């Protein structure tokens, strides 16, 4: 998806690999596992530092949880990288079987969004811009704060490259 959006993509697994990138995508998956692996591989502090320094980052689903300053319904002791002044509720739309797809407006464009045991944004600070909401409940599912972008849904699963392109354009403009 990143290549299609005009960027070259490399995997980042070690702190030193953070030096060579202009932007970071934190994909979906399981935020509790990401947190534990980030600690095991000494990535949590370097990630926090790079993001504090202004590294652009895009988190989808579990990645959104990782970019949230505060979370609800995390496991005991669960930590995030943080960066976006928001509270994100894990598994907010329900369990795996409650996963769903929906059309919604993302930054003014109609996109088809896939939600898999997805979080939503429960509350946000004044510096955070809402880029997308969805039913049920008109929940906030896409946000931006400066160089940080997050969506509850998985644009990489639809073949529609516009959300990734939005991020790549953001990185280029910063
Ligand atoms: N429920 C997962 C979590 O808490 C996120 C699911 C996903 O990324 N699709 O991290």
Image (cartoon, rainbow, N blue to C red):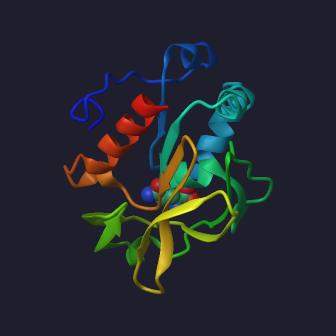
* Residue 13 percent coordinates (x, y): 53, 23
Residue 169 in percent (x, y) is at 36, 37
Q: Is residue 113 left or right of residue 13?
A: left
Query: Which quadrant of the figure has residue 76?
Result: bottom right
Coordinates of residue 166 in the picture (x, y in percent): 35, 45
Q: Residue furthest right?
A: 77
Is 49 placed above or below 108 here? Answer: above
Q: Is residue 133 left or right of residue 4?
A: right
Q: Quadrant of residue 14?
A: top right
Instruction: Name which residue lies at 50% across and 47% down.
Output: 59
Please tell me which residue is depicted at 35% across the width and 63% down the height of the picture: 106
Q: Quadrant of residue 3?
A: top left
**146 or 162: nearer the viewer:** 146
Residue drawn at (67%, 40%) of the image: 36
Total numbered circles? 0
Q: Could you say which is closer to the camera, residue 23 or residue 158?
A: 23
Find the residue positioned furthest to the front. Answer: 173
Quick check: 66 above or below 23? below
Task: Judge left or right: residue 73 versus residue 9.
Answer: right
| Residue shown at the point (59%, 42%) measured from the top left | 34
Indicate the quadrant containing the N terminus: top left, top right, bottom left or bottom right. Answer: top left
Q: Residue 40: x, y in percent? A: 70, 29
């Amino acid at each position: 998806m990143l290549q299609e959006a005009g960027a070259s993509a490399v995997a980042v697994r070690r702190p030193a690999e953070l030096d060579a990138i202009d932007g970071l995508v934190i994909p979906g998956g399981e935020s509790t596992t990401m947190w534990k692996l980030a600690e095991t591989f000494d990535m949590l502090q370097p990630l926090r530092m790079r993001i504090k320094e202004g590294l652009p980052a895009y988190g989808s689903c579990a990645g959104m949880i990782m970019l949230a300053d505060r979370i609800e319904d995390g496991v005991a002791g669960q930590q995030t990288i943080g960066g976006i002044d928001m509270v994100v509720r894990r598994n907010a739309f329900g369990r795996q079987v409650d996963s769903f797809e929906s059309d919604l407006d993302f930054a003014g464009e109609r996109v088809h969004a896939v939600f898999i045991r997805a979080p939503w944004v429960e509350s946000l600070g004044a510096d955070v811009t809402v880029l997308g909401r969805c039913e049920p409940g008109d929940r906030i599912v896409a946000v931006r704060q400066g160089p940080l972008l997050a969506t509850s849904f998985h644009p990489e699963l639809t073949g529609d490259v516009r959300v990734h392109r939005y991020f790549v354009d953001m990185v280029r403009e910063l």
